Amino acid sequence: MRHHRLRQERWLHTRISGDLQEALKREARRRRTPVSLLVRNVLEGALDLVEDIVEDSLAIARRSRGLGGSAHRAEELSDVYGWQELILNRGAVCGRCETALASGAEAHRGLRDRPGPPVFLCATCIGRLRTPAAHRKENAS
């Protein structure tokens, strides 16, 4: 029954230098963890880091090309049918006002039917959504 495990783990075989092997063993001993777990954690961490860098780079590229204009932002948000409140685990940018949202900040993620990059709103922009349009016009007068 060993092959009926709950986790679908796979083996990955690779060649490494003797120096890297010794460094991995030293670090595993220091952390008091098996080398295989250390390697798995390092790989997962590296992939998460690359994903964060790519997302941040795309956001920077959009802003630097002038695509952060209000027409583009409205288009990005046009298919959002609702907003889910959450606490950010990593930084993001408000999809409407481009305010930087830090890790640990309260934000709202746009829910949509089509796939695509996540879009977030800051508390100020969500507050504007909650204010009925007629009320906004009265206050502007």
Image (spheres, rainbow, N blue to C red):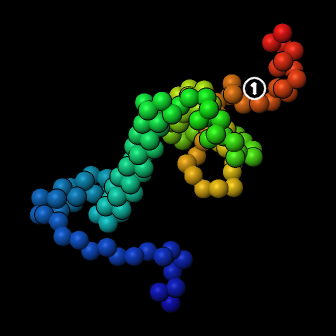
Figure disc tally = 1
Q: Is residue 84 visible?
A: no
Question: What x and y, as percent, mark residue 59?
Answer: 47, 37
Question: What x and y, as percent, mark residue 108?
Answer: 67, 38
Q: Residue furthest left?
A: 18
Q: Which residue is mark 1?
A: 128
What residue is drawn where x is 80% and y is 30%? 130
Q: Residue furthest top?
A: 141
Residue 105: quadrant of the picture: top right
**111 relative to 9, above or below:** above
- Between 135 and 83, the one lying in front of the other is 135
Query: Mark 1: which secondary structure?
Result: helix
Q: Residue furthest front?
A: 71
What residue is drawn where x is 75% and y is 26%? 128
Residue 84: quadrant of the picture: top right
What residue is drawn where x is 58% and y is 39%? 88
Label 1 neighbour load within 10 Å: few <14, some 14-19, many 20+: few
What residue is drawn where x is 42% and y is 36%? 61
